[in-house]
Image: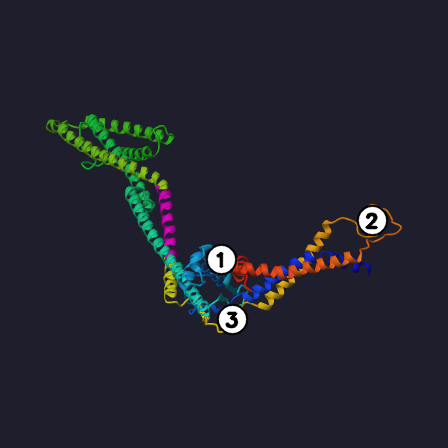
Amino acid sequence: MDNIRYYFSIFRRRFSYFLIVAMVISAASIIAAMSLPPAYESRAVLVMESPQIPEELAASTVQAPAYQQLQLVQQHLLARENMLDVAYKLKAFPKIDEMNPDAIVAAMRARTTIRAKGARRGEAPIMTIQFEASNPRIAAGVLNDYLVLIQARDAEFRRGRSGETLDFFVREVDRLSAALDAQSKRILEFKQKNSGALPESLEFRLSQQSVFQDRITQVDRDVSDLNSQRDRLKQLYELTGNVETPLDRRKTPEEAALEAAENELADALAIYSATNPRVKVLQARVDRLLQSVSVAAQANLNEEDGDTSNTEQLPAVLAVQLSEVDSRVAALMEQKIQAQERLKLLDASISRTPEVSIVLEEMEREYGALEGQYAQAQDRLAKAQTGDQIETRARGQRLSVIEQPSVPTQPTKPNRIMIAGGGTSFGILLGLGLIVLLEMLNSAPRRPEDIVSKLGITPLTTIPYVQTQGQQVRLRLRRIVIALLIALGVPTAIYMVHIHYLPLDLIADKIMNKLGVRW
């Protein structure tokens, strides 16, 4: 009980401070509540509609989430340029020509309320827009302009996105088509430049290589046979003086064996070298048979009459036969040279084939990758064209107005009771807070408990200050005068500010614009 009396005494002592603060704020809030002009609020509701064509059949190229699109629309609507355009167009404020652009933008944003919902799954994406104005027609007009901006922005955004997507894939298809043509041209030029070493003709060239190798072997064999025949003709003439060929007379067994041995030796020389044991054996056999044939021929020569007419004709026949053999040898050697040159070219082209094959495979692999990208781009281009047609004909996702703004007939703001009551309550609380602050800053002891807690001394007794009757009367009169001055002076001062400096409704309006709230 003593504490309550103590605190009440402190309140009485500081009552003037409390009264000043509470009266100033309460009077200001009451005057502002009474002087604020009525405000009319118009409302519009929009919904993000689903695509009219199922995505399973044809999908739009604009795939932004509905709630995200609502947020983008909100940010675009509250842009500075849009706020200024709408405000100047409809003269949204009484003295708009005297306001600076920053104040206009702040006032427009403070009077515009946008609520979007649909972030949660299964919730319809809906946007509610409200605008407050002192004139009901201005409130509805501003919302109508807002709707025009929103729908134009939505259509522009969707068509722009679909058009940009279509243009991108058109350019991508053109680029890949040009790249395919260029790569195809490079492959063709490379094949023409390396036509003799292409991997697809490798099998043919390998077969040609075998053919020419066999041909060279056969030529060597034929040349060896002709050389052997030439040597036999010479030996036959030297031994017998006769140039009969095997076709002119019947061969003796020794001559037949010699011819067979010479053929076998020629075949062996085509495969083995002259130092090979098999070749040496065959050569010794040929020499032995040749000696036997020479002995037999010499014996036959001694038995012949030696006709002079035949003897004179033998050198000419021998020359013709030797010339024929030499011509055939020369022709075969020419064929061998040509075959060797052709074989050399084939060997070079075959050795270059792996390198050409690697380069060609790399070029064809790049061509295949480009071809796959081109097919993919063509498919995406077709989808982009379909999506662009959907957006052009407004068959995709779009913002629709489900509640048009109407001209309000009754003001919705200000809430005068809330402003006056709230301001008065705030003034009282602020006055009490000022008293508490002053007491916290004052550390002088006032009660025996304060003396004990601060000085550590327990007083025997305390004697309060006793005022005389005159002092009490003067103190009461002073308090009454102060209260009257506060009660009359504060409202008068506020009223003078309202009349001569700036109306309180404008001050309150500026405060609400700064805070971004409307009461």
Q: Is residue 362 visible?
A: yes
- Determine which quarter of the picture holds residue 265: top left
Q: Is residue 461 above or below residue 338?
A: below
Residue that carries the numbered disc 3 in the rendered image = 411
Residue 492 % position (x, y): 59, 61
- Determine which quarter of the picture holds residue 474: bottom right
Q: Quadrant of the C terminus?
A: bottom right
In the figure, is residue 15 to the left or right of 411?
A: right
Q: Amino acid at mark 2?
A: Ile
User: Which residues fall within the magenta stretch?
Assistant: 356-377
Asked if the residues shown at circle 1 and circle 3 are in contact, with their CB atoms under 8 angstroms apart, the answer is: no
Sooner in the amino-acid sequence: mark 2 or mark 1: 1
Q: Amino acid at mark 1?
A: Ala
Element type where label 3 sits in the image? loop
Mark 3 nearby-residue class (10 Å; few <14, some 14–19, many ≥20): some
- How far is disc 3 from disc 2 in space, using C-alphas? 61 Å
Residue that carries the numbered disc 1 in the rendered image = 106
Callout in the foreground (2, 1): 2
Name the residue at the right extreme. Answer: 460
Q: Amino acid at mark 3?
A: Pro
Sooner in the amino-acid sequence: mark 3 or mark 2: 3
Element type where label 1 sits in the image? helix
Residue that carries the numbered disc 2 in the rendered image = 451
In the figure, is residue 296 to the left or right of 465?
A: left
Q: Main secondary structure of the magenta part?
A: helix
Q: Is residue 496 above or below residue 275?
A: below
Residue 47 % position (x, y): 47, 68
Residue at point 49% right, 69% down?
A: 40
Q: How many marks?
A: 3
